[in-house]
Image: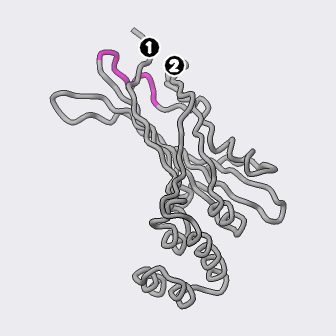
Amino acid sequence: MAFISLCWKKNWRVETIKRCFTPAWRALLLSLAVGWGSISAWAITPVELHGLKLERIEQGVYLSATLQFEIPTVLEEAMFKGVSLYFVTEVDIVRERWYFYDKNVAHIERHVRLSFMPLTRRWRVSVSGKPFSAGGLGMNMGESYDSLEDALVSVRRLVQWRVVNLADLEADSKQNIELSFRLDLTQLPRPLQMGAAGQSDWNINLVKKQRLVVELPP
């Protein structure tokens, strides 16, 4: 741990990689460093939100939408080298209050891990309600796909995701819904967190906020 901490404090350079990491990590990080160096500093990975739909089903409010984005070549190459990518979608329901701070009514998260399996040459998508690094592995649902594009369909789609109970909403109050989506660097191995910091290709995120309008029971 002290060794990793020492490396963390150093500047991110090829010489640092050679001194601080094992041969396996050096091969991976040096390869990625070359890819990072060839990408323009102004490159971005845009994310668009399509078909946002909120509907009342029995005693809950469910959200459906599609997140449109592409995986940059650098990240695809990283997955071929054994790196899993982690995406997190968060939804907050907030009630406006003129006399005090707005009240957070509900918060929910969706964590997705996207991995390439070299032995089978297939892609794996696992979904959990909490970070995999915090024990989500034991509570996740997963499926395998033949191609990266097929796997991304599962990553991008939100289908009737229950985001709040009707009992938590007030008919006479103004309530907003905020959806955020991002590539979660905190769940990457520590050495990759160091390399990804400041790299625009790893900066995949979106924030969308709008009024929550749902027909509530009398």
142 to the left or right of 17: right
Relative to 184, say whether 215 is above or below: above
User: 194 or 117: nearer the eye?
Assistant: 194
Q: Residue 46 appears at what percent x and percent y?
A: 53, 47
Residue at the spot 56% in from the left edge and 51% down from the top edge: 87
Q: Nearer the viewer, residue 32 or 184?
A: 32
Badge 1 crowding class, 10 Å Cα cut-off, few under 14, some 14 to 19, many 20 or more, is: few
Q: Secondary structure at mark 1?
A: loop
Tell me, yes or no, whether the highlighted magenta stretch contains residue 170: yes
Quickly name the residue at label 2.
Answer: 56
**The magenta segment:** 164-172
Residue at the extreme bottom of the image, as rendered: 19
Q: Which mark is residue 215?
A: 1
* Amino acid type of the residue that numbered disc 1 sits on in the rendered structure: Glu
Q: Is residue 157 magenta?
A: no
- Asked if the residue at tag 1 contacts the one at tag 2, i.e. Cβ–Cβ closer than 8 Å, the answer is yes
Amino acid type at mark 2: Arg
Q: Is residue 202 above or below residue 37?
A: above
